[in-house]
Structures are given as structure tokens and as C-alpha cells.
């Protein structure tokens, strides 16, 4: 028995089934979609294996640039809303000594795990044309209003879905800040805003960056939320991919949009890794 | 004083988070179909409608539940083996393999859904339960690898070595010593794999066919075509099932280590 090669072989055998599934049902399909994105669309055969730049040129049409801008804008707004709502919750969970911590965490994670379509259905019942808010307004003698089909509604829906993704890493970051640091700042006369901006915010920055990355990347690829809460008026890249694949059957162009979405995600991930490295260097020097 | 202000703000944010779910549960017991809050009475009318509706029953019990159970078992076995290989055996190439196992988390789900749809059509596969199970495995395996790896790092390797010095073979030492120690992380991986599959809509919207409509996809099309509170009853059952499973997961494992 060769002591140096055997563990490596056993290890390779153990990870092989998992890597096999990922190769056949993630990496190969992704390679296929990248390949189809440069192929020619054919109304009869869907796509022909003739390389073209036409799909990418089409993507720069003002309409698609507009949808891309809406998508990025919604992603950024959702991330900001989650950061603002996430800090108080994360601070509370990290700092308040509580026998009820398990309950608070359970109430935070359960909505995250329930299918997004159910949570969006809940918002439709509240905000929809026949929904609770409109019924209350009409009962009070006011006119009903369309609360959906605007950017604010989509951002609110997404922020409700993704808030736990922001809270959990923020909470982990705040937990690592010693309480004594906060107490020292207080004793030296720091007000609450000063305490936040001078102490909590810089020290919890790694948590904020990871939370923002998660919220942003998931929100720019949203499909169900804009479909149900934005309707025809607020369309994101995800809606275009869905329509091009299943309705227009223009698979090459659908693939182009999907690859663009992947490119945005990769760019943001790279920025994230750079930022984290810079933060680590800074704290290493300090 | 300041502390109570913070608690107030946190409760308000939790209400924003939980409001859609609470409303769905409330509406499911409404005797009318007017979607009012609070409901004018309590009735099980929409639950009766759910249990007597063939399409809903099929989507819930014969499609979603079956797929989630298969994904849970397969992801736990495949992901558990991979975690053992990563933590206990691989030295060279470990970082690379670990990164590969985490890639599904950074690939947008609708991108994977669209890619699988094109891939299955290229292979001329009919839409099937197998197609959904394989897609869900891709997104469920990383969860299992992460929880089980965390459990293995926590299980002291010296215990296994002690068993081996007392005459146990490597496999016996693993089965009798380490496996019981990582039981809870395996259970929690299985639960999360089940939930990931049971809640998924982004993949299923692309790869489910007429015979394999999952519960979230059926709910989606019902919302688009005719919203009636049967959706709320079906949703409430899903919320109860998931909350129950998470309650169990929290008992056996620290919830935060997974998410």
C-alpha cells in the first residue's frame, strides 16, 4: 500500500460523483449557452451553428440597454434598502443577550426558505388592485390606486425576499467587534451616529460587503418578482430571458442576455474579492 | 430607553419580512374569496378546495414532494461523500475542488434554468422528473457539502486514529466514530436539500413540463390566470412544512452555520 497516493485516490473517488453531476448539469449546459449566444438565429431551426456577432449587437439596441439599466438600478436600490434595514436587525441579533435568539433567527430564516412565489403572492394580496390596501381605501371613500407595476414595488418585494442574506453576514461581522470598543467610544463621549459611523460601520465593513454581494447578484437575476409585481411596466433581464426562451423561441438571443447576466455577476464578484483583499490588508496594517 | 427604540425598529422590520406570509395564512382561512384582512370568519373551505383539486394535489404530492425527497437523499449521499473526500483525503487540489463545489451558488438560478432547458432540448430529453431532480441536485449539493464539511472539521480526527490504533480498520473507524459525530450535520444537509428543491421556482419555470408541474410553478400560473384563495391554502401548507423542517434543523444543528 502506497501511503502517499492512496488518500489522494480515495479522495478523488469520493468527490467524483459530485463533480460528475456538476460537470454534466452545470458546466456543460453553461458552455452550451455561451456557444449558442454566438450562433445565428433561424426562425425554422431555432439556431444554426454559424458564428455571428448579431445577437450581441442586438443587445446594444436602446430597448435592451434600457432594460439593463432598470435591472442594475433595481439591484442597487434593493442592496441599499437591505443595508439600511439590515443594520438594526443584525446589531440587535449580535448584541442583545437573549434566550430568544433561536426564535428570532427562526423567524428570519423561515421566510427566506419559503418559495419566493408564495411571498410575492402575499404582497399581491396586500398591494394588488383587489388587495387589502385598496379595499381599505375604497371603504374609506377614496379611489383605489395602482400600487404595483413600479420600481418601488419591485424593490420592496425583492428587499423583503433578500433581507436575511444581508442580516446574516452583517451579524457575524458585528459579533467579532468586542463590546469594549463600543463602551470605550461611549465613555469618550461618542453620540449614537458617531458610534455607528466611526466604530460599527468600518469594523463591520467585510460583513456589509459580503451581504451586498449576495443581495445584488440575486436581485439582478430576479424573474418572479418583476413578473408578478412589475408586470409589463417594470421588466428586468430575467423576464427577457424567460420570454425569449419560452415565448419567442429565439434561443441565441436568450443566451446572449443570459451570458450578459453572468458577466455582470462575475464583474461584481471580482470587485468583491478585490475589496475584501484590500480590507484584509488594511486591517493587517492597522 | 435606547434599547426599546431598537427593539421597536427591529419588530417593525420583522413585520415587513413576515407580513406577506402572515397575510397568506390569514387569507387561507377566509370563508369568502374577497382577500380581506382581517377575514370576516374562519373556514376550511379553501383547504377542501385544495384537497379536491386534482392539479393541486398532483403538483404537491406527486411532483414536488417526490422530487424533493429524491433530491434530499441523493444530495446528502453525493454531497456527504464529497465533503469526506475534501476534508479527510484531498490535500493537493483541495481549494480548486472546493471552489468547483461552490460555483452553483454564484451562478444565477435563471441562467442555470435556461441553460438546462436548452441542454435537455439538445439531448432530446422529454421533460421529466429526472430532469428536475438533476437540476435541483446542482443547487442542493453545495449546501450539503458546506454543512457536512463544517461538521467534519468539528469532529476530532484523533478519535478516529485512536479507534484505528485499537485495531479498527479505517472504514470501521469512520463508520463507528466519525459518522455518529456528523449525524446532525448530515440531517441538516438533507433538510436543506429538501427545502431548496421544494421551494425552487427559477429552475422549474424552465424545465418543468405539462406532466411535471411543481407546486411553486402551479401557484405561479394560478396567480397569473385566476387568483383564488386555494393558492393561499396550498401556500400555507408549504409554509407549515418548511417551518416544521427548519424547526427540526434548528434543534439538531446551528441554523446559522448553513445559511
Image (spheres, rainbow, N blue to C red):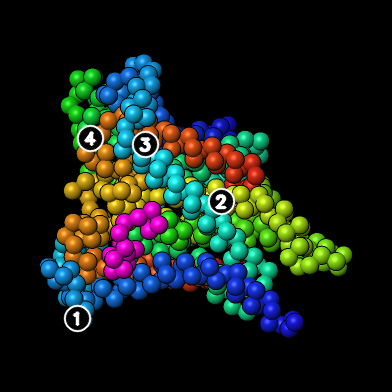
Position of A208 with respect to B147 (left or right) is left
- Residue beneath the point at 62% across and 58% down: B148
Kindly report which numbered mark, 3 or 1, lies closer to the viewer in this rendering: 3
User: How far apart are the two marked residues, 4 and 1, measured between alpha carbons?
Assistant: 43 Å
- What residue does disc 1 label? A50
Position of A241 with respect to A9 (left or right) is left
The residue nearer to you, when weighing B5 against A155, is A155
The answer to which quarter of the image holds residue B173 is bottom right
Q: Is residue B117 magenta?
A: yes
Which one is earlier in the sequence, the residue at label 2 or at label 3? Answer: 3
Where does the magenta region start and end?
B116-132
User: How far apart are the two marked residues, 1 and 2, measured between alpha carbons?
Assistant: 45 Å
Q: Is residue B19 visible?
A: no
- What residue does disc 3 label? B57
Q: Is residue A10 visible?
A: yes
User: How far apart are the two marked residues, 2 and 3, measured between alpha carbons?
Assistant: 24 Å
Q: Main secondary structure of the magenta part?
A: helix
Q: State which chain disc 2 sits on.
A: B
- What residue does disc 2 label? B190
- Secondary structure under tag 1 reads strand
**Which quadrant of the figure contains the N terminus of chain B?**
top right
Q: State which chain disc 1 sits on.
A: A
- Secondary structure under tag 3 reads helix
The residue nearer to you, when weighing B66 against A264, is B66
User: How far apart are the two marked residues, 4 and 2, measured between alpha carbons?
Assistant: 35 Å
Q: Which mark is residue B226?
A: 4
Amino acid at each position: 500500500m502506497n501511503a502517499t497516493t492512496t488518500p489522494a485516490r480515495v479522495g478523488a473517488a469520493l468527490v467524483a460523483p459530485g463533480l460528475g453531476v456538476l460537470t454534466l448539469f452545470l458546466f456543460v449546459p453553461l458552455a452550451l449557452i455561451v456557444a449558442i449566444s454566438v450562433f445565428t438565429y433561424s426562425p425554422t431551426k431555432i439556431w444554426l451553428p454559424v458564428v455571428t456577432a448579431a445577437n450581441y449587437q442586438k443587445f446594444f439596441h436602446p430597448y435592451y440597454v434600457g432594460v439593463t439599466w432598470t435591472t442594475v438600478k433595481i439591484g442597487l436600490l434593493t442592496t441599499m434598502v437591505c443595508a439600511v434595514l439590515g443594520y438594526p436587525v443584525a446589531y440587535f441579533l449580535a448584541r442583545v443577550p437573549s434566550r430568544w435568539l433561536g426564535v428570532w433567527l427562526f423567524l428570519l430564516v423561515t421566510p427566506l426558505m419559503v418559495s419566493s412565489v408564495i411571498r410575492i403572492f402575499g404582497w399581491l394580496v396586500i398591494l394588488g388592485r383587489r388587495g387589502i390596501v385598496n379595499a381599505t381605501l375604497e371603504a374609506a371613500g377614496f379611489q383605489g390606486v395602482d400600487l404595483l407595476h413600479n420600481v418601488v414595488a419591485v424593490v420592496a418585494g425583492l428587499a423583503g425576499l433578500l433581507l436575511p442574506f444581508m442580516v446574516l453576514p452583517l451579524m457575524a461581522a458585528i459579533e467579532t467587534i468586542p463590546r469594549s470598543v463600543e463602551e470605550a467610544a461611549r465613555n469618550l463621549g461618542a453620540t449614537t451616529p458617531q458610534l455607528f459611523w466611526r466604530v460599527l460601520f468600518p469594523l463591520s465593513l467585510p460583513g456589509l460587503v459580503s451581504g451586498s454581494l449576495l443581495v445584488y447578484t440575486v436581485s439582478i437575476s430576479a424573474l418572479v418578482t418583476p413578473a408578478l409585481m412589475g408586470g409589463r411596466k417594470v421588466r428586468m433581464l430575467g423576464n427577457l430571458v424567460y420570454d425569449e426562451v419560452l415565448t419567442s423561441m429565439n434561443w441565441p438571443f436568450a443566451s446572449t442576455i443570459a451570458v450578459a447576466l453572468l458577466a455582470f455577476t462575475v464583474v461584481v464578484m471580482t470587485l468583491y474579492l478585490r475589496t475584501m483583499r484590500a480590507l484584509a490588508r488594511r486591517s493587517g496594517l492597522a | 430607553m435606547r434599547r426599546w427604540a431598537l427593539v421597536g425598529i427591529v419588530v417593525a422590520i420583522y413585520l415587513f419580512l413576515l407580513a406577506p406570509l402572515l397575510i397568506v395564512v390569514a387569507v387561507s382561512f377566509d370563508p369568502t374569496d374577497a382577500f380581506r384582512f382581517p377575514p370576516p370568519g374562519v373556514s376550511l373551505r379553501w383547504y377542501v378546495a385544495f384537497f379536491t383539486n386534482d392539479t393541486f394535489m398532483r403538483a404537491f404530492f406527486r411532483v414536488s414532494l417526490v422530487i424533493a425527497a429524491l433530491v434530499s437523499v441523493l444530495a446528502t449521499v453525493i454531497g456527504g461523500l464529497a465533503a469526506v473526500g475534501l476534508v479527510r483525503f484531498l490535500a493537493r487540489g483541495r481549494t480548486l475542488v472546493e471552489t468547483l463545489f461552490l460555483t452553483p451558488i454564484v451562478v444565477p438560478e435563471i441562467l442555470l434554468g435556461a441553460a438546462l432547458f436548452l441542454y435537455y432540448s439538445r439531448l432530446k430529453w422529454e421533460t421529466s422528473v429526472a430532469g428536475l431532480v438533476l437540476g435541483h441536485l446542482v443547487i442542493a449539493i453545495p449546501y450539503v457539502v458546506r454543512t457536512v464539511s463544517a461538521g467534519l472539521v468539528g469532529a476530532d480526527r484523533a478519535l478516529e486514529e485512536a479507534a484505528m490504533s485499537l485495531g479498527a480498520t479505517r472504514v470501521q473507524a469512520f463508520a463507528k466514530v466519525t459518522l455518529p459525530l456528523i449525524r446532525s450535520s448530515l440531517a441538516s444537509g438533507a433538510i436543506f436539500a429538501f427545502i431548496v428543491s421544494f421551494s425552487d421556482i427559477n429552475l422549474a419555470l424552465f424545465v418543468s413540463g405539462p406532466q411535471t408541474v411543481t407546486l411553486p410553478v402551479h401557484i405561479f400560473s394560478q396567480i397569473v390566470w385566476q387568483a383564488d384563495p386555494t393558492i393561499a391554502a396550498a401556500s400555507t401548507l408549504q409554509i407549515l412544512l418548511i417551518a416544521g423542517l427548519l424547526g427540526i434543523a434548528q434543534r439538531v444543528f446551528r441554523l446559522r452555520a448553513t445559511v
